[in-house]
Amino acid sequence: MNFPARLSLLLLLLVGLAAPAADPTDPLDYFKRHLFPLEPMYFVAGPKTPNARFQISFKYQLVDAASSLAGWSGQTTNFYVGYTQTSFWQWNRVSAPFEDNNYKPEVHYLWPGLTNLGGRAMSLSLQTGVQHESNGRDGPFSRSLNMAYLRPKLVLGEPGGWQAAFSPSPVVYLGDLGDNPDLARYRGYGDVRLVLGKSDSVQLATIARIGNQADRGSVQLDLSYPMNKLIGGGLTWYLHGQFFTGYGESFLRYRERSTAYRFGFSLYRESFAP
């Protein structure tokens, strides 16, 4: 080993000895290790009212991998609580009001590697959970539902290369749909997601629904591209274009057909990982 290599190794050892060990009781460190993105997070805007649409979404791991419970059964670390909020903003109007806010808390369980059907080139995962969705309003403007869902995901292609993910998600409505009794006619009983692209390049994600009488439904297309590939600099966000046509873009106006296109940016997009 030459002198520069020996010096580099010595410096690495000194840094390792000087670095403080992670404190397992530090609440901030614990929070960071258990918080993950859930659904795509984006801000997009266009010419039609409501002009802007944005979404935030996170999930939190309920059982620490280093806990005694995880030692008893590693499967317990797959329980999560999640929260997604989608908002529609009329920023071209006086006082720039929000037209609708959809709040979606949930609890789910994730089997990240249900089976490897073809090694790294083909994998299957499964997520199942219970979700509440409402717009937080009362009277005639109130919208709410509870549902249980099952979401398998089949991914084709090697990680880092071109991949395709297919994910049908059937749902069962739970309890009373009194605020929106005909919801199934417009949303049906689930959705189908298809994602094509590369994790470090362009990606096209599609979400499609069809009403239970096949006369309603919707399609949403999300096209994104990493900014770091365009201008470098270590940017961690994406250029994002979104197109929607059909019924139910807004929970408040789920009976109304609309078509909208918007452009903006996203911080997190559909993942090929479970």
Image: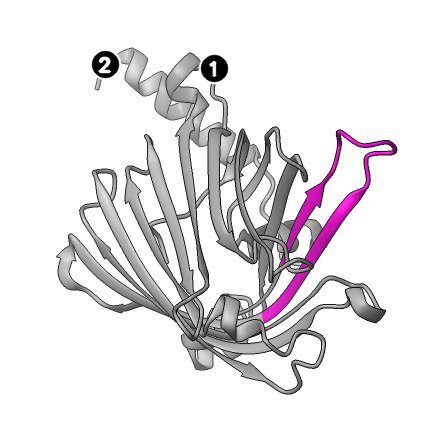
Q: What's the residue at 64%, 63% (across, down)?
A: 104
Pointer 2: what residue? 2
Q: Amino acid at mark 2?
A: Asn
Q: What's the residue at 77%, 68% (across, down)?
A: 142
Q: Amino acid at mark 1?
A: Gly
Name the one closer to the observer, 182 or 27.
182
**Alpha-carbon distance for marks 1 and 2?**
34 Å
- Between tags 1 and 2, which lies in front? 1
Instruction: Tell me the element at label 2.
Output: loop
Q: Residue 236: where, in percent of width, then height?
A: 50, 28
Classify residue 147 as left or right of residue 153.
right
Residue 112 visible in rendering? no
Is mark 1 in CB contact (under 8 Å) with mark 2? no
Residues in magenta? 84-106
Pointer 1: what residue? 233
Residue 9 visible in rendering? yes
Q: Is residue 128 above or below residue 158?
A: below
Magenta span dominant secondary structure: strand
Q: Is residue 84 above or below residue 148?
A: above
Verify whether residue 102 appears in magenta. yes
Q: Earlier in the sequence, mark 1 or mark 2?
A: 2
Q: Residue 265: where, in percent of width, then height?
A: 54, 30
